[in-house]
Image: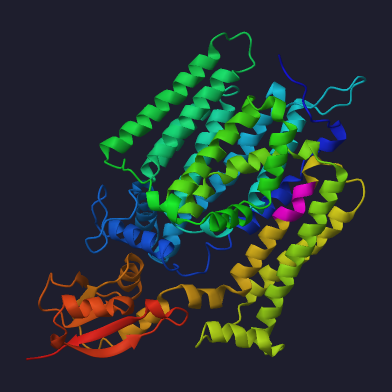
Amino acid sequence: MNQPTPAIVAQSGVRRLPRIALLLLCLAYVVPGFVGREPWKNADMTAFGYMLELARGGDWLAPTLLGQPPEFDALLPYWLGAWAMQAAPAWMAPDFAARLPFVALLVLTLTGTWYSVYYLARSPRAQPVPFAFGGEAQPTDYARAIADGGLLALIACLGLLQLSHETTPALAQLGCTTLAFYAMAALPYRTVVPAIGLLTGLAGLALSGAPAMAVLFALGGALVTLLDPPADASSPGSGWRWAALVLLAAAIAAGLAWWLQAWHWRISSQAGEGRELRSLGKLLLWFTWPAWPLALWTLWRWRRQLGSRHVALPLWFVLVSLAATIVTPAADRSLLLGLPALATLAAFALPTLKRSVSALIDWFTLLFFTGCAVIIWVIWLSLQTGVPAKPAANVLKLAPGYETSFSLIAFVAALAGTLAWGWLVRWRVGRNRAAIWKSLVLPAGGAALCWLLVMTLWLPVLDYARSYTPVVRGVTAALDTPGCVDTFGLSRGQLAALRYHGHVELRAVGTARDCPWLVVASDVQASASLAIDMKRWQLVTTARRPTEAKDNLLLYRAVRP
């Protein structure tokens, strides 16, 4: 027996969010962060290094970087970046070419989330209460309005900002997870496209380093399909057919991962025991904000429909991601995969929110993001003009040696985004705004605004602080004679940076005896003295990374006998 729905929505509350406004918001969110920057340290630079090695002729089934395999068996993202670099024209920078498939993956994530929410909202048990004299929201219009709210909730999530703009396996996993989530949500209404999306999403997730999560997502999706089968009564047994299709796709994905030897045990006991509950709680609070309080409200208000597919399916995806967050070392990247489903749960809170709660969200969001935007502008003005002086002094203290630059294009983009924010605030505080997605307009717009400002006004100083270019420049400037370079103790990101920015021939120490140069990471200098006969080497320079001393590199020259 179906339980009564808590959603009470009139037709006037489901008017569409203007498509041009939604597209501009997505554009302002997607493009900044992919354009105009260098590869950043650690994961971003490391992943790009493996892509570059493949594009130059590496082993496509076993990519390596100076003999080191990737930390995660994620073949698909490296393939995508390498293919893009090979197909790009000669004038395009390789690092920008490698980002293009990841731009598509982020667009896929946003689009897939919208359609996932749309099809889940079309479920009969997700529909609002019918009115005695008519006037309730029509099913298609209601589903479209809820989908708009789900997309806004995803854009508003703070944890999505940086990780969704890096060329790493995490973004490939996110795109494939969203594709599989969409397929399971749309199967009762479509056949061909969801079936293709299901197989592609689960297989892509397995090839992106998360085969176990692909299988778990599919198992839960099949169970939800059996518990809440499609509403088409003329198709008896259709629930079993859809469940079988999901399980078949999961089996194919698992078999593909096993064949490519990408199935490894990644659960770390130290991740669960050593990680403090307090730090994990902080990560959950800020990373999933503002979707998590709305998702909890959904679970409470829709508690009588927990077995319904519009609640059970996204809840399962969120629970799997939370479990992976707890037991795996990369907590934030595991939690990232649950954001589309969490945004879906948050969207179903919208038709049940009281006006006072909606007003509280608006005022908090308005004050928070306006304050952040003001701070970003003030610091930029201080760097450009010296007034006020203290913010610029603080930045230069954190990034010594940084020289201020001005970009007219970045300034115009930041100014346009700020003016758009002012218009959005004026629209939101206006009267007769009955659309149910209105409570998430300011959170999504504020997140997009601050990301746009940071990636335009602050991009030069962020590039200086987070890229390896300064330290590589310090090494290459001292290489006054040609020859290969031995390396000891360098991270994968440092190796990739030297290969890309420095254009030097690198070798692991001990593999060649005739290299005239040696580069050692400063944090393993003591270990190098034990492993290498340092009497053969003379220190030439210390290439310092301005913002982090442990990333300094020591350059040695071979001493002639």
Q: Where does the N terminus fall, quadrant-wise? A: top right
Q: Where does the C terminus fall, quadrant-wise? A: bottom left
Whether residue 192 is visible to the viewer of this picture, yes or no, is: no
Q: Nearer the viewer, residue 88 or 539?
A: 539
Q: Is residue 481 placed above or below 104 in the rendered structure?
A: below
Q: Examine the image and state in which quarter residue 486 appears.
A: bottom left
Q: Residue furthest left?
A: 561
Residue 495 position in % (x across, y down): 30, 69
The residue drawn where x is 76% and y is 32% is 142
Q: Is residue 269 placed above or below 221 in the rendered structure?
A: below
Residue 191 position in % (x across, y down): 53, 23
Q: Is residue 219 left or right of residue 78?
A: right
How many badges with numbers are in the image?
Answer: 0
Q: Predominant secondary structure in magenta?
A: helix
Q: Is residue 344 placed above or below 184 in the rendered structure?
A: below
Q: How is the image coloured?
A: rainbow
Q: Nearer the viewer, residue 276 or 560?
A: 276
Q: Is residue 128 left or right of residue 503?
A: right
Residue 7 position in % (x across, y down): 79, 30
The residue drawn where x is 39% and y is 54% is 81
Q: Which residues are magenta?
A: 439-444
Q: Is residue 390 left or right of residue 464?
A: right
Q: Would residue 515 be counted in the magenta stretch?
A: no
The residue drawn where x is 66% and y is 53% is 289
The residue drawn where x is 49% and y is 48% is 325
Residue 494 position in % (x across, y down): 34, 71
Q: Is residue 34 placed above or below 11 in the rendered structure?
A: below
Whether residue 489 is visible to the viewer of this picture, yes or no, is: yes
